[in-house]
Amino acid sequence: MTSSPPVPDAGTPPVRAPHVGLVILALAVGGFAIGTTEFASMSMLPLFAQGLGIDAPTAGHVISAYALGVVVGAPIMTVLGARVPRRRLLLMLMAMFTVFNGLTGLSPSYHWMLVFRFLAGLPHGAYFGVAALVASSLVPANRRTRAIGQMFLGLTIATVVGVPLASWLGQAVGWRWAFALVALLGIATMSAVAAFAPEVPADTDASPLRELGALKRPQVWLTLGIGAIGFGGLFAVYTYLADMLLSVTHMPLSAVPWVIGVFGIGLTAGNMIVPVFADRALMRTAGVLLVWSMAMLAAVPFTAGNVWTLGLNVFLIGVGGALATVLQTRLMDVAGDAQGLAAALNHSAFNTANALGPFLGGLAIAHGYGWTSPGWVGSALALCGLGIWAVSVSSGREQRVAAESY
């Protein structure tokens, strides 16, 4: 989105705002709205499949349409918004999100719903990219990751509160009202951002071409690779968690929301705790999280037989989700003066992971390796992500040595 100056150092003062906490809260409300619509759509799939007269596999294309919108929208919206002040850009993105979620609830047919879900996904990555830049600009450089983590709490809390609420509303009065709830959350976000976010003029040197300059930086691509592959394991397990609980743990359907809620609590805890360490040693923390995910995902086949051990395992897997926050800061560090595009592409990378992990996990299940096999698949993906992390660290070290010798 908005182009930014180079990453702030210790001597760069933060942007002045009367109420920093309220600004971050306003941004987090937007994350809550986005998280609610993204994850609740999965839980309501049978409801709108029945309502639109289509089968479940066909309805699943609606989920894919939203994810495709995120992947496509992040770079396009960023480049188009290169010269727009951040506060105004946030309002424009959330207005677009609000309108198309509202229209989703009014969809007269499956094909219209596909279109509206794709369009609703376009501002997703761009919003988080700009929101991360705004949150980090409000605090000293050594607190950036914590500020971004606080903004992301809206997304993680949505998995604990927003998704069950929207799912309940969809079952009680109809799935269309769940999207109306998301639209109301979008309006609340716009009101809060308009009231509390500081008005900072656009960078006069910003341009679409400068934003595209992020794509010339190898470290940007390596960081995106860590997210797109290393994060895929989390989604591999999350996607098949309900089936695992029913077929392996032998729990009733009523227990599924509780275990999924535990996953959300793990995500929230991770985004509260991990950024403290990331602000001290960013890439080291990313490496530790990838090793953590390898171990926790590999443990799934051994914990799935008991709901208590699986629940603890799922919580610990959720903690590893803080990798998203850490990589968000890393992209800001390596993007130079094209931070907007790099920050937004973080969410394109994670939606790629959201497609890759379940696909590979599904292949393992289809080939007869059982419902717990996505754990092994996820651990292998985390290992591959760790390999990309090692390349990134090594090449970054070589660049520093070359610069010092020069």
Image (cartoon, helix red, strand yellow):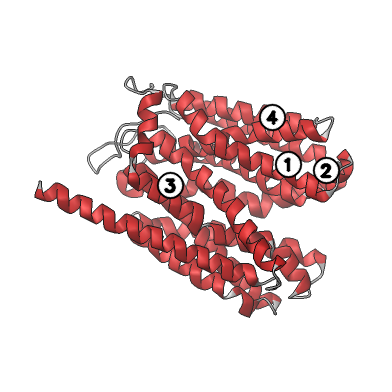
**Amino acid marked by disc 2:** Phe
Looking at the image, which residue is at 48% across and 59% down?
230
Residue 345: image location, x then y, percent:
47, 40
* Label 3, label 1: how far apart the Cα atoms are: 27 Å
**Amino acid marked by disc 4:** Phe
Q: Which mark is residue 48?
A: 2
Toward the viewer: 276 or 103? 103
* Label 2, label 4: how far apart the Cα atoms are: 16 Å
* Label 3, label 4: how far apart the Cα atoms are: 26 Å
Q: Quadrant of residue 313?
A: bottom right
Q: Nearer the viewer, mark 4 or mark 1?
A: 1
**Could you tell me which secondary element the residue under label 3 belongs to?**
helix
Q: Which residue is mark 3?
A: 328
Toward the viewer: 162 or 344? 344
**Is residue 59 left or right of 313 when viewed as pictured?**
right
Q: Which residue is mark 4?
A: 100
Residue extending furthest top?
204
Q: Which residue is mark 1?
A: 62
